[in-house]
Image (cartoon, grey):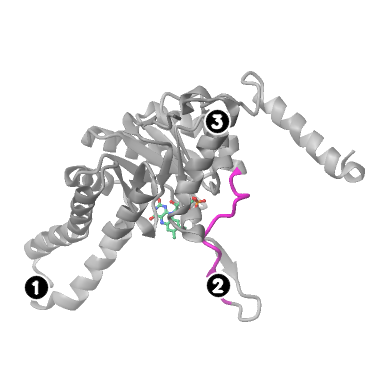
Amino acid sequence: MKILETKYMGLRLKNPIIAGSCGLTSTVEGIKKLADSGVSAVVLKSVFEEEIIKEHEDTLKNDLGAFENNMEFLDYFDYQLKDNVLGKMASLIEEAKKVIDIPIIGSLNCATSGEWFSYARQLEKAGVDALELNVFKLPFDVEMEAGEQERLYLSIIEKVKQYVQIPVAVKIAPYSSNLAALVKKMDDAGADAITMFNRFYNVDFDIMTDEVKAGNPYSSEQDYYNTLRWVSIMSGKLTCDLSASTGIHSAETAIKMLMAGAATVQVVSKLYKDGVGSVAGILKNIELWMDKRGYVSIDEFRGSVHHEPKENSERFERVQFMRYFSDHYPHQIL
Ligand SMILES: Cc1cc2nc3c(=O)[nH]c(=O)nc-3n(C[C@H](O)[C@H](O)[C@H](O)COP(=O)(O)O)c2cc1C
């Protein structure tokens, strides 16, 4: 009998596989299917502040008519509209809670710093067991200093933590001018977990029509290397948990993330490509591997492998880089 039980942000999970935030977690049926497949928690599809603003603008345009210039009414209306989107989310949580018994993690993505804590609080009231803040904004602004962006992230974490009692994870992008320092500061600011990493809408071009189109939204099974590197670099340096996300398509990759020190792993593209039922196979194969290696519990091998000596990681990376390219392209490099 293998013990897959895992603690994540203080939540007791029956195993380390979580369904990450995506369309599959946006309906009660989807959430129920995922729970039946064996995942230990679900992260709901994010509430995006823009959706609320869009609904707000459309409704104002279509329905307001004679009330257009009445500020009191606008205030009331604004409140009602926000309530609508979050109200729908609250009923989703309430209905899902009736049919599943695994934790539900709410997900938020706000564009303005003021709204984070108010939405966070409403999701907490609606009954989520934890929150995941999807804080990343692409750094488009050529005038914005890296430190400014960093301060924005930290203030969001500090604020949300003041307003809610439930654990708060922060889902980040792999892009930062100083990722290790940023993650450490997020830990210090009170994040209960860091989810590494988000995957964004990819831009592609059609070379026959000159049109901009969407790139492939799904990861491939080779896309896990960067996450593995960073989980490995950061685990052991933080008080908060790490959740590995991006490119986890197999038991083997999930095991690598756990060996690197992740508390949990999140799967999304695998669910879209091979169906929700594929979770059972991943869990089974983790158990088979544990059997082969003589492990009884996940905690026995979590954080057991580091890709670098702790003391001199920079030098280690340089040497590996030189060796890799001299092995593969001996004539060009050396
Ligand atoms: C169709 C789709 C919808 C997604 N929606 C969200 C979302 O609403 N919020 C979020 O934080 N991440 C969202 N993601 C990102 C995933 O949660 C995940 O971080 C990313 O896909 C990398 O994991 P994977 O390699 O297992 O797909 C979405 C991904 C996909 C493919």
| Secondary structure category for the residue under label 3 | helix
- Picture coordinates of residue 8 (x, y %)? 37, 32
- Picture coordinates of residue 286 (x, y %)? 52, 38
Contact check, label 3 and label 1, Cβ < 8 Å: no
- Residue farthest to the front, as pictured: 1
- The residue that mark 3 highlights is 291
- The residue that mark 1 highlights is 67
Alpha carbons under labels 3 and 1: distance apart: 68 Å
- Picture coordinates of residue 155 (x, y %)? 34, 37
* Among numbered discs 2 and 3, the one appearing first in the sequence: 2
Does residue 212 lie above or below 112 as drawn?
Answer: below
Q: Which residues are magenta?
A: 211-224
Per the image, is 223 magenta? yes
Per the image, is 246 magenta? no
Query: Would residue 323 be seen by someone viewing this image from the given angle?
Result: yes
> Which residue appears at 44% of the width and 51% of the height?
137
Query: Would residue 148 be seen by someone viewing this image from the given angle?
Result: no
Nearer to us in this view, 141 or 226? 226
Nearer mark to the viewer, of 1 and 2:
2
- Residue farthest to the top, as pictured: 311
- Picture coordinates of residue 112 (x, y %)? 32, 51
Report the predominant secondary structure element of the magenta stretch. loop
- The residue that mark 2 highlights is 212
Give amino acid for label 3. Asp
* Among numbered discs 1 and 2, the one appearing first in the sequence: 1
Does residue 184 lie above or below 69 as drawn?
Answer: above
Specify whether 195 is left or right of 226. left
Instruction: Please tell me how crowded label 1 is: few (under 14), some (14-19), or many (20+) other residues with Cα within 10 Å.
Output: few
Specify whether 311 is left or right of 194. right
Quarter-of-image position of residue 321: top right
> Which residue appears at 89% of the width and 45% of the height?
332
